[in-house]
Image (tube, coloured by chain):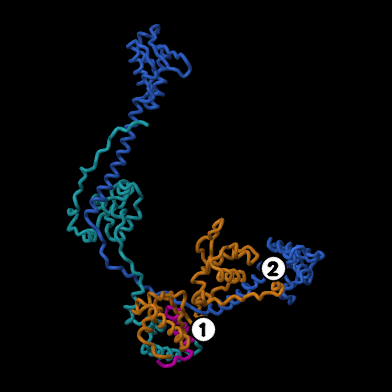
Chain colours: A blue, B orange, C cyan
């Protein structure tokens, strides 16, 4: 359906910046008193515009739809039979909020026309590009001192050496770790067992004196020594002390037990 | 046009060479007067340029001074073919700009509340044209950005400073709201 | 200064807006006079500007006309220039400069190895200040640039030559090879 209305507002539609703008257009077109908006009439016209927009397949911004809902809501409240208000506050005109918003909007709408006119006028003023004016370099001497130069160099070198030292520290760590290798621990235990005494695990690898790594490796080494048949292990209670005694019945007595451990 | 004294001669040379606005302090420093005296000289000069048979005029923008051609001579200047005709703004832009100008610094939410419509795009355009700028964040939840007009805004709309903005039309108080019952 | 008539007003606006010289033909076309009349008007205008209390003058260059500031006002115009103050060296600049000074000629890679940070920016600053300069390229893969200190460096530090650099007391540097306990 292509109505006269559709034709009339084809050009206009896209120019409405928002629902207020459209409402204003309707108010001005109908020469309506903004303080006494005939809500029935305006709502009808507003919805007509929206359907015209739909006919034209224009995207209707959600704000327009929200306003439509607001108008319908106000309309329904206006249509309700007037009851005796129970409290004074309830007698508020349902149009009040809308009117206030429209008035606020109107202020800026009018101001924007004024700004547009001013801009139009001042657009004719032309400015000149700046001339090339060289920078003034203040003739101040740099404040420098040869000693600072020396100190900076020494500090830089010190920092650099410290960094290098960090690397050697790392090397030390690696070497230390090498000391707690399984192999060395096995050797250590075998050495102690040669004396033929009963060993207390917690005495050889006291966690208060040795590093965690050493205790752990020591434990693995203990198991390894048992596996090699070089020692017997027993523990009286769970989590109790672990004892180690030389295994005198082992068959490999003639061989060097160290040769049985694979190289790590 | 009255005689221009030496100080005015120097100021003309300065402003011509600069092209850009020159701050009052800088002019005062160069001509060797205090700021107050310099301001009087400049105000006098603005008047002289305006009323003399001159093609150029003197403008004050945010306490800085700049020469430009008189807007009414635009038709001739356009014929040079070298100056680019600046495009006007859209109605949305003027509308948004007036809300920013009179309420600055202002959040996007405030602008949208008055306009009743999403204003992301138009704000971006105004920032792009250097008419408004972000000036910080509001101290409310979400810390929304605050916008204010720029010096370019003053230039484009022919204001010396924000005090030049014409007063906003006050709403007449509708009768309906006048009979608020007294408790 | 005599009165400037409308034609002269237009010409002032044109020349101001253009900044560059405007050919006689163009001016004639815009003010709607023939070239001969226009030339008379312009010659008259040159004289007027010269003798009036004006900060700007009109000059003819190759049958084109341009406004410019009067040369005798140059001392004032120069003061518009931004004053750049040389600041002292930053600690980074000092450090880099000392590495260059004591190890020159030196590559950027060497400097960065000692400093442990990228030194592009600080090298550029030192070159800009004319304290160091490129003196060739190293004969290693990639042919990196070599830097050395300048004459300006010697002058600023008050050295006669590089032998004046204060000797380094590197013995003070402690050897740190202590055992580090595990955990």
Q: On the picture, is B157 further left or further right than A264? A: right
Name above or below for residue C70 compared with residue A11.
below
Q: At numbered mark 1, what does the secondary structure look like: helix, strand or loop?
A: helix
Quarter placement of the N terminus of chain C: bottom left
Residue located beneath label 1 in the image: B73
Residue A52: in sight, yes or no?
no
Q: At numbered mark 2, what does the secondary structure look like: helix, strand or loop?
A: loop
Question: What residue is rendered at 57% in x and 65% in y?
Answer: B123
Q: Nearer the viewer, residue C101 or A41?
A: A41
Asked if residue B73 lies in the magenta stretch, the reply is no
Residue C30: in sight, yes or no?
yes
Subunit bearing disc 1? B
Residue B27, given in percent of the width and then of the height, sits at 38, 77
State which quadrant residue A198 falls in.
Answer: top left
Residue C81 is tagged as none
What's the magenta bit mostly, secondary-structure-wise? helix
Q: Nearer the viewer, mark 1 or mark 2?
A: 2
Q: Nearer the viewer, residue A30 or C21?
A: A30
Look at the image and give the residue range highlighted in magenta: C1-29
Q: Is the residue at mark 1 from the same chain as the one at mark 2?
A: yes
Distance from the alpha carbon under mark 1 to that under mark 2 = 63 Å
Subunit bearing disc 2? B
Residue B183 is tagged as 2
Quarter placement of the C terminus of chain C: top left
Check disc 2: other Cα within 10 Å, few if <14, some if 14-19, many if 20+.
few
Question: What residue is rendered at 44% in x and 13% in y?
Answer: A234
């Amino acid at each position: 359906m292509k109505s006269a209305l559709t034709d009339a507002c084809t050009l206009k539609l896209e120019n409405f910046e928002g629902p207020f703008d459209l409402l204003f257009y309707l108010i001005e077109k109908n020469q309506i008193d903004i303080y006494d908006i005939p809500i029935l009439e305006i709502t009808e016209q507003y919805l007509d515009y929206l359907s015209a927009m739909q006919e034209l397949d224009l995207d209707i911004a959600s704000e327009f739809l929200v306003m439509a809902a607001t108008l319908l809501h106000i309309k329904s409240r206006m249509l309700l039979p007037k009851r005796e208000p129970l409290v004074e506050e309830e007698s508020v005109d349902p149009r009040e909020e809308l009117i206030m918003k429209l008035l606020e909007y109107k202020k800026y709408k009018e101001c924007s026309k004024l700004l547009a006119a001013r801009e139009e006028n001042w657009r004719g003023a032309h400015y000149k590009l700046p001339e090339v004016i060289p920078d003034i370099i203040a003739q101040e001497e740099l404040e420098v001192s040869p000693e600072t130069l020396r100190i900076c160099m020494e500090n830089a070198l010190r920092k650099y050496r410290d960094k290098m030292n960090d690397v050697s520290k790392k090397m030390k760590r690696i070497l230390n770790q090498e000391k707690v290798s399984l192999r060395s621990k096995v050797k250590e235990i075998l050495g102690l067992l040669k004396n033929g005494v009963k060993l207390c695990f917690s005495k050889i690898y006291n966690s208060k004196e040795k590093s965690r790594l050493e205790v752990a490796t020591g434990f693995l080494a203990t198991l390894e020594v048992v596996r090699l048949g070089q020692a017997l292990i027993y523990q009286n209670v769970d989590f109790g002390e672990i004892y180690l005694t030389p295994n005198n019945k082992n068959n490999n007595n003639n061989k060097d037990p160290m040769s049985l451990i694979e190289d790590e | 046009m009255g005689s221009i004294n030496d100080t005015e001669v120097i100021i003309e040379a300065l402003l011509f060479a600069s092209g850009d606005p020159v701050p009052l302090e800088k002019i005062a420093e160069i001509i060797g007067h205090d700021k107050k005296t310099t301001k009087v000289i400049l105000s006098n000069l603005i008047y002289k340029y305006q009323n003399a048979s001159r093609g150029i005029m003197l403008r004050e923008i945010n306490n800085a001074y700049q020469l430009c051609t008189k807007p009414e001579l635009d038709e001739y200047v356009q014929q040079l073919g070298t100056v680019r005709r600046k495009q006007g703004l859209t109605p949305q832009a003027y509308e948004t700009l007036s809300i920013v100008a009179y309420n600055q610094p202002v959040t996007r939410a405030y602008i949208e509340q008055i306009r009743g419509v999403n204003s992301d795009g138009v704000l971006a355009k105004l920032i792009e044209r250097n008419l408004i700028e972000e000036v910080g964040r509001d101290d409310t939840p979400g810390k929304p950005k605050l916008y204010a007009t720029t010096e370019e805004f003053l230039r484009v709309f022919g204001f010396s400073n924000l005090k030049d903005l014409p007063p906003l039309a006050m709403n007449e108080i509708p009768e309906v709201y006048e009979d608020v019952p007294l408790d």
